[in-house]
């Protein structure tokens, strides 16, 4: 999309709607919000993102937000416990999020999948909203992100590389 088209997409989401979304997440204006919009499935990299955030210098000022359905009801609880133990602020927003408002409310979007995705819809949607994406260097996202220009690509499963990308 052109810059004008991206701005038009962002303008469709009101400031009030964006503020309500951040408020629902408990994200004060000083927090950097990193959104992982994906089904709560282990291969989507939720644990990797928590571990990388725990190693990142951005940890104190960032909030991870996970949106999406879950394959196991206990997985969200496991992720919350891991985040607490790691000193990482995490909001599991669950399914049914207003995705345009969620993308507008996020500062960055992460797609830390540990297995290749054929397309990676959340990466494309984030790009359409002008959001910078950090994604695993595999599958569709590796083809839709211009590394260092429209986002960053990190090796799948490499906590250190992901922490550096978050920094």
Image (cartoon, grey):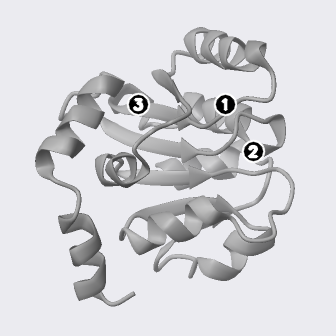
Residue that mark 2 sits on: 44
Residue that label 1 marks = 51
- Secondary structure category for the residue under label 1: helix
Tell me the residue at 29%/35% (across/down). 21
Q: Which numbered disc, 2 or 3, marks the residue that appears first in the sequence?
A: 2
Looking at the rendering, which quadrant does residue 17 occupy? top left
Q: How many marks?
A: 3
Label 1: few (<14), some (14–19) or many (≥20) C-alpha neighbours in 10 Å: many
Give me the residue at 28% from left, 28% from top: 27
For disc 2, the neighbor class at 10 Å (few under 14, some 14 to 19, many from 20) is: many
Q: Which residue is mark 3?
A: 63
Relative depth, front residue between 146 and 21: 21
Residue 16 x/y as whole percent: 13, 42
What number is the disc on residue 160?
Answer: none
- CB within 8 Å, label 1 to label 2: no
Nearer to us in this view, 116 or 102: 102
> Quadrant location of residue 33?
top left
Q: Find the distance from the CA under tag 1 to the CA under tag 3.
A: 13 Å
Left or right, 110 with respect to 62, comes to right
- Residues packed near mark 3 inside 10 Å, few (<14), some (14 to 19) or many (20 plus): many
| Contact between labelled residues 3 and 1, with CB atoms less than 8 Å apart | no
Q: Earlier in the sequence, mark 1 or mark 3?
A: 1
Mark 1 or mark 2: which comes first in sequence?
2
SS category of the residue bearing label 2: helix
**Mark pair 2, 3: CA separation:** 18 Å
Query: Which one is in front, 113 or 102?
Result: 102
Mark 2 vs mark 3, foreground winner is 2
Vertical order, 74 against 53 (above or below): above
Can you tell which quarter of the image residue 3 is in? bottom left
């Amino acid at each position: 999309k052109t810059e004008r088209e991206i701005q038009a997409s962002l303008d469709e989401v009101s400031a009030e709607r964006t503020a309500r979304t951040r408020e629902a997440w408990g994200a004060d204006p000083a927090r950097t919000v990193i959104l992982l919009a994906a089904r709560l499935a282990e291969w989507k990299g939720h644990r990797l993102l928590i571990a990388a955030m725990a190693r990142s210098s951005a940890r104190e000022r960032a909030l991870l937000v996970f949106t999406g359905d879950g394959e196991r009801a206990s997985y969200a609880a496991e992720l919350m416990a891991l985040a607490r133990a790691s000193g990482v602020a995490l909001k599991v927003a669950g399914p049914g999020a207003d995705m345009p408002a969620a993308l507008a409310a996020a500062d960055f979007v992460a797609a830390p999948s540990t297995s290749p995705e054929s397309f990676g819809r959340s990466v494309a949607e984030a790009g359409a909203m002008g959001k910078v994406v950090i994604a695993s260097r595999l599958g569709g996202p590796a083809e839709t992100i211009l590394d260092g220009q429209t986002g960053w690509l990190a090796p799948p499963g490499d906590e250190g590389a992901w922490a550096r990308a978050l920094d």
